[in-house]
Amino acid sequence: MNVASTDWNAWVPIALALPLVSFVVSFWMGPRYGWLVPLMATALLLAGWVCTTVILVDHSAGTSHFAVPWFSLGTDVIPIGWWLSPRSVTMLWVVYTISLLVHVYSIGYMAGEGGIARYFAWLGFFTFAMGGLVVSSNLLVTFCCWELVGLSSYRLIGHWHQQPAAGAAATKAFLVNRLGDIGLLVALMLLWSRAGTLDMPALTAMALSEETKTAVGLCVLLALAGKSAQFPLLHWLPDAMAGPTPVSALIHAATMVAAGVYLFVQLHFLFSADALAVAAVVGLLTLFVGGWGALTQFDVKKILAYSTISQLGLMVAGVALASPEAGFAHLFTHAFFKAGLFLGAGALIHAVSRHGHAPQQDIRHMGGLWQSHRLVLVCFAVCAASLAGMPLTSGFLSKEGLLLHVRHHSFYFGVMATASFVTTLYSARMVFYLLSPTPQAAATHPVPAIMQLPLFVLSVGSLFIGLSASPLSIQSWWPVFDAIESAPWVMVVSLAVLVVGVGVAWRLYRHRPTATLHARWVPQTWLDAAQKHIAVTPALQASRLTHHADRRWLDGVLHAASYGYVTCSFVIGWVDRVLIDGWVTTVTHAAKGGGKLFRSLVNGKIQSYLAWGMLALLSFMVWMLYQLAHR
Amino acid sequence: MGLLLLVVPVRFQSVFRMAALVVGVAQLILFALLLASFDASQPWHGLEQAAWFSIDLGTWGKLQASYLVAVDGLSVGLVGLSVLVLLLAVVSSWHVQENIKGYWSLLLILNGSIIGSFCALDLLLFYVFFEFMLIPMYFLIGIWGGPRREYASIKFFLYTLAGSIFILMGIILVYLSYQDPTQPAVAHTFNILHITNPLQLLIDSPLYTADATLGSYRGWTFLLFFLGFAIKLPAVPLHTWLPDAHVEAPTAISVILAALLLKIGGYGLLRFVYPVLPDAAQHFSPWVAGVGLLSIIYGAMNALASKDLKRLVAYSSVSHMGFVLLGLASGTSEGVGGAVYQMISHGLISAMLFLLVGVLYDRTHDRQISHYSGLAERMKPFTAFVLIAFFASMGIPGFSGFIGEVMIFLGAFRAAELGIFGLWIAITATTGLLLGAAYYLWTIQRMFFGPFHSRAGEHNLVPLTTREYVMLLPLAVATILLGVFPQLLLHYINPFVQAFLVSFSSLTD
């Protein structure tokens, strides 16, 4: 095993260490210097971001690998290190960029909230874990980071832990993710037992059997279904919106949920054709379930959550059907516009919510903000346009890339075009509600500049220049994305879909219908029910059964045995006392009585001598009489 | 090394707890000295031998046992764990009120016998130490325990005694089959160094057979030992003494029970049962793995159903010790190393969990999960420690539990690939991780999240005292340290595992 690669790059450990320092220092400073924590955490992250930018510029082409032994198992060594490729450094940079912007935004958003040190600490920890996940060269280390991002997600969803809903959502998110994690663990163990290594550079060079690839691929698919909210493990994500909105932007939209897709891209070579086909089906199903879910919601964060699910489905299907690069390109653009949408939504929620009340997140009550919050709404609309795939945006380009790749498969192309239509529909619906002049929101607050700045940056990043120099072609600045020959008819089709989508949305939602759909039409309802009936109830029943077994059967056998034993000993005790002892007592009594009797022969009392003499005489006389009678 | 055994019940007239503390600290210092001079490449360290007794049996030769102690890569970790946990147990029972003299004397007897059994290299000596743990434990639970302490202590005593009888039978069979090469006049030997050497196997002795299946002497001996140690471990379905003993025992005793006494089950199997009977071990490995799997799932299920926090933690121990059996059954370097790692890691984590339950119980005298809610709001440092302990126990990376479990899974899957047992066992065992997360997270959600509520009132919930920090912090630090730098411990474990597997494979050939 080659662990002696020595492409040392000091920027990588520094970039990873800075958020970790932020985690430790935030907790340490929290009790006394709470006000300083946001500034300190943001400053540390800014420094980390500079490091990742340096790494990005250094590694725009080629790969480098560095590893040192972490621990040894017998003769095998588990290394720890990084594997930098254009893809991983891009992802690392995206993670740090969004994280930095979310840190800046949180300074304003979380001002005056309780537990602010804890909040920034876990943001830092998340950034560290996510960075580790992205650059790690060893899959076991990737797995560690994979679990740690889940842990920080758990802590951040449950940030407002006094609210029961937040606690429940955190538990649910963690457990569903844990199910996925087990998939990844099994995949790793299968690789270890069959390939003998978990080192990614070594694995890429290895030829594995198709059967192994199918098994590993399906297990990885389970993992990414958990992390990236793919069908049927998607129902935790809408609940996860109970966390603070900047967290939703960073973790549950831009980066962590994309980790599954990123892993899929990275491990694409481990998937057999069969596993890829299953992944494509899962991705397409998720695409539609998410799109449909977004149409059923009025809570702006839940709309965005379903939209994230649907876009993640698109990415998975894209990686499976088109190419890893095309899927990754969409991941890249999605990170910007979805983070922008969440931060925009957070700003609007902040604007219309009153302190001490539950935050107002219903798009039916968030109208009439155009006069007071023009910049926020424009930025939000730009990001939504990018989500819908409008020309001049980055979303248009990355979606174009996906469509170009599948243009020869008419079925998949049709499915993806239809999905684009659904995306356009819900994006336009959301924007129509928010831009409408009525109803006037009850109270409005100004949005601080420190929250507007990251939003502005992200909306600029959602324009085409975030991805490519040209607004019409994906021929890009990034070497990650391979060149695809263009086909003008694809662009025509996607523009047509866009126009139709906006038109239908205008027709349906122009008058802002307020009727809520029955809960049974919301995908989460069925999935929650399925979770309850398939997993939770059986598990609880089984646990009651084992509890019963423990108490009644195992302990019962034990108690029965001990009662039996005690009963036996009583019986034996009785036998001992009455029968055996009784016999002995009889003999002793007899002996004693006899002895007493005979002792009276010689006891020196004249009376007893007389009595004995009389008795002897009497017996003699009786005997004599008897003799005489029979004579 | 023998100095560690100088711990005898000191019946001081005054200040028993100071004596216990001094002994604990002295042990820690001695252990540090031992560690400083420990050379992992050497098989045995601090070997100390003295004749114990020798009885002439005429034509049967001599019955001879010796005081033979040493540590190697397996026991050094466990001795270190014992020293740490016993010291913390002293700290945690600082405020014991009734019958102080008895309590501290028994605790010191227990201390000596635990460390003794981890060091003993003579089967009879091991057995004596093993038995000797029982008596102080019986009294410590039976006198200082909770409301059902008499039931619990008798159950504990009888269960363990039954296990010891099986072990004694096994020891006699082993004793009759091996000879001491240095003393031909003495027909048989208890020396573990000799009995693990197949060259010393006596011809025509009970264990001199190639047949290791059920019904042969080798198979029977293995089963006797396994049964005895499975009670101690404990493995389902021989575990029901454990939850009762834990629930009734005072905090410090629960800590010792979970962190150290359970480990002796795994230690015994690793120390001589597997090396003496590798063929039988291999023959029965699917069954051992099956028992491990059953313990993992069944223990986790029971933990999920527990309403009492301490009972939950007790069942989680059953589940985690199931992993030890699974790793052992795999017979691979990852799995066996993982089993040792898991034993030590579980020692640290379970000690922390029981101490935390004790912290809460000291304040409110109430352990019902449903009687609390929103504790995170009122007891922040306590919640932080609970989260660390729970996540460590769940096997989250960064804590020692993860390393142990992942090594065991690496071993189990490789064993499945080698055909030692079915792949389904390894895959099903991974669901133990999900169940583990389920019962812990559910507990966090119920006890620590949500609006604050405590049936016992809130005035009792005083902040953690310095004494409590002193006992919790070292465990938290050790867990994280071993989770981030596993090589610290694997440095000692790996040479042992290599030697273990060499004897294993050479014997099976």
Image: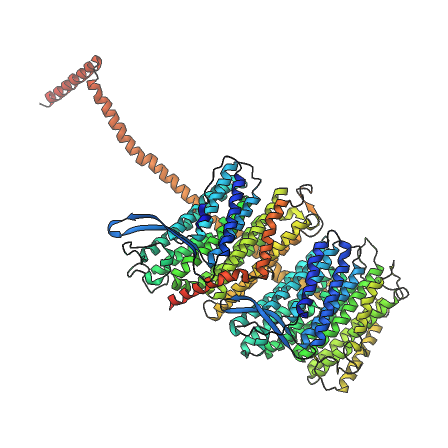
User: Would residue B385 appear left or right of B295 to someone viewing this image?
Assistant: right
x, y percent for residue A602:
19, 18
Q: Which residue is pictured at 42% across the width and 51% down the height? A: B163
x, y percent for residue B320:
53, 57
Q: Quadrant of residue A463?
A: bottom right
Out of A259 and B111, give the one closest to the viewer: B111
Vertical arrangement, residue A271 with respect to residue B258, above or below: below
Out of A568 and B438, give the one closest to the viewer: B438
The quadrant in which the C terminus of chain A is found is top left
Q: How many callouts does the rendering have?
A: 0
Task: Indicate the colouring scheme.
Answer: rainbow
Which residue is at the far right?
A: A371
Which residue is at the far top?
A: A606
Query: Do we see residue A343 in this rendering?
Result: yes
x, y percent for residue A587:
26, 31
Vertical arrangement, residue A577 with respect to residue A549, above or below: above
x, y percent for residue B394:
59, 58
Query: Do we see residue B302 in this rendering?
Result: no
Vertical arrangement, residue B491 with respect to residue A601, above or below: below
User: Would residue A329 appear left or right of B98 to someone viewing this image?
Assistant: right
Q: Which residue is pictured at 52% across the width and 46% down the height? A: B24
User: Would residue B327 appear left or right of B374 to someone viewing this image?
Assistant: left
Q: Which residue is pictured at 76% across the width and 69% down the height? A: A338
Q: Quadrant of residue B280?
A: bottom left
